[in-house]
Image (cartoon, rainbow, N blue to C red):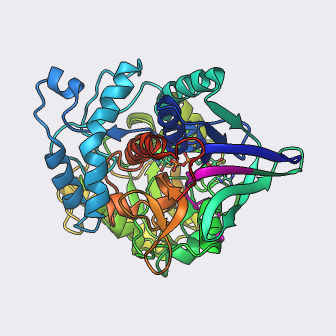
Amino acid sequence: MTAGDLGRFDVVVVGAGTGGLCVAIEAAAAGASVLVVDKLTDVGGMLHIANGEFSGAGTRRQAARGIDDTPERHFDDVMRLSHGKADRDLVWQTVRAQGDTVDWLESEGFDFDPATPGLVHGHEVYSVPRTYWGVEFGRSVLRVLRRRLDDAVRSGSVRLLLGTRIRSAVLDDGRVTGVAGTGSDGREVVAYGDAVVLATGGYDANPALRNEFLPPGCEDAIVACLDHATGDGLAMAVEIGADVSRDGFFIPVMGLIPDPGRSGFAVDYREAFLEFAPAYRTPYEIWVNRDGGRFVAEDGTSPEHRERALLRQPGLALHVVWDRAIAETAEPLIRNGAGDWTRERMLSECASDRWIVAADTLRELAERLGVDAAALTETVERYNAAVRAGHDPEHGRTTLPMPIETPPFYGITSIAASLLSRDGLRVNGDLAVLDREGAPIPGLFAVGEVLGNNVFAGDNYVGGMSVTPAMTLGRLLGARLAADRPAAGQEVP
Ligand SMILES: Cc1cc2nc3c(=O)[nH]c(=O)nc-3n(C[C@H](O)[C@H](O)[C@H](O)COP(=O)(O)OP(=O)(O)OC[C@H]3O[C@@H](n4cnc5c(N)ncnc54)[C@H](O)[C@@H]3O)c2cc1C
């Protein structure tokens, strides 16, 4: 072994996020020697910021609450919500085992929110309650995975190497036999494995790469994920001939606030987002586009409908407009997972000039927001008339609590956001990465967001169908790679 040579393992996992940790935990539990490499100094990947909502059917938790559900029903829901565009084979492979993942988390002491399983209104809803989350969201999932990883590291079955960025695959006669990269001290490292698993996550924090996949007109979407999602695994695999999906599906996440200090990126979701789901907060405000017009009923119950409406607006931007009387009456528009946005905090935010613009007249507000002033004034007049009439002939909004007429007036801009990658590496049912002829690249596997979320959600969002396939297929892959590993002394086929 030369300096920088980390040795040979049964399984080398690149990426210690949701999917990679699950591969490592199960492979190690089944007796494999595993190396886990991550470029960051901590494990967990997107679980640090994610809601961590996961879904699974036929679970013990559902049964205990009298909820009748099956993987078949989950599958039908996924195909319905994805408009038939998700990958049937991979969806079935994951949903039939997602209930086991939920039960496994439970047996590992997962701190379920008592309200789960529930129906979640941030995306189109499932037909039965089958979505779960922890009291600390993604960090609750991470707590379980971290504990299992630590056990495996202590027992010697997993070696964990942090601060090491993998840059390329090592090839031997067309087979991937290892990976090479740069360690935290700047030294080159190489590690060999009978199987190499790319679990490097998505590419959304790399807007140039992301924009290569987004359909035309979506380049203005702001980034709402953590910085590690730069598409490294995708680029690495493409370099050696891997095929990549290019489905052109994009549906934004709404409610993210552009970060004034970082162009093109959103304010951290853990700190603040705008609550637009009427199931969680009664809307008192209106939303206008840059032309100063409303474009959708702000109280519509279909997330998909409003997300698609936003996609048609200039700059993918909407501006929420309200007034002092609403600020003193409504629940805070800004939320976060910690639940610490009180009305008082919201009122002081209104006066801070950080994200929210305040003005004594609608004309001045429009100018500060970059919105057509005459049109905004007319829009507010028409909306106020609708409130008085109790009827919104333009958009059919039925929640019409108060007119917008008491200065100061407030506005905040929100831009459509991308937070998980829609396209990714093509794989077969064994999660082997396929080349551009459709043949598996020997020795190379992939799991998690590096596959692209279109595989599990088509052209929509489907509850839990990013975190749960990463965990579930990761666990199955880890167990299978351990079971399939060549016996000592046997040649790798
Ligand atoms: C705000 C937000 C909320 C979300 N909420 C949900 C939700 O409620 N439900 C849901 O299903 N999904 C949700 N998602 C999406 C979900 O969290 C991710 O799709 C999923 O966690 C991705 O898991 P992963 O293992 O593929 O990648 P990640 O968890 O991103 O892990 C990838 C790891 O690979 C490492 N890495 C990358 N490149 C290299 C390299 N070159 N060398 C070494 N290491 C590397 C990274 O450092 C990282 O640790 C959310 C996402 C965001 C941003």
Q: Would you say residue 364 is visible in this rendering?
A: no
Q: Is residue 335 above or below residue 15?
A: above
Residue 338 drawn in magenta: no
Q: Is residue 492 above or below residue 437?
A: above
Of 78 and 279, the residue lying toward us: 78
Of 179 and 80, the residue lying toward us: 179
Q: Position of residue 393 (x, y in %)?
A: 19, 67
Of 325 and 449, the residue lying toward us: 449
At x 85%, y 47%, the residue is 4
Left or right for 405, reference 86: right
Left or right for 25, reference 307: right
Q: Position of residue 225 (x, y in %)?
A: 57, 51
Q: Is residue 131 above or below residue 277?
A: above
At x 50%, y 37%, the residue is 27
Q: Position of residue 191 (x, y in %)?
A: 72, 49
At x 52%, y 74%, the residue is 213
Q: What are the residue bounds of the magenta stretch?
A: 191-208
Q: Position of residue 37 (x, y in %)?
A: 68, 44
At x 67%, y 55%, the residue is 178
Q: Would you say residue 482 is visible in this rendering?
A: yes
Left or right for 139, reference 265: left
Of 343 and 36, the residue lying toward us: 36
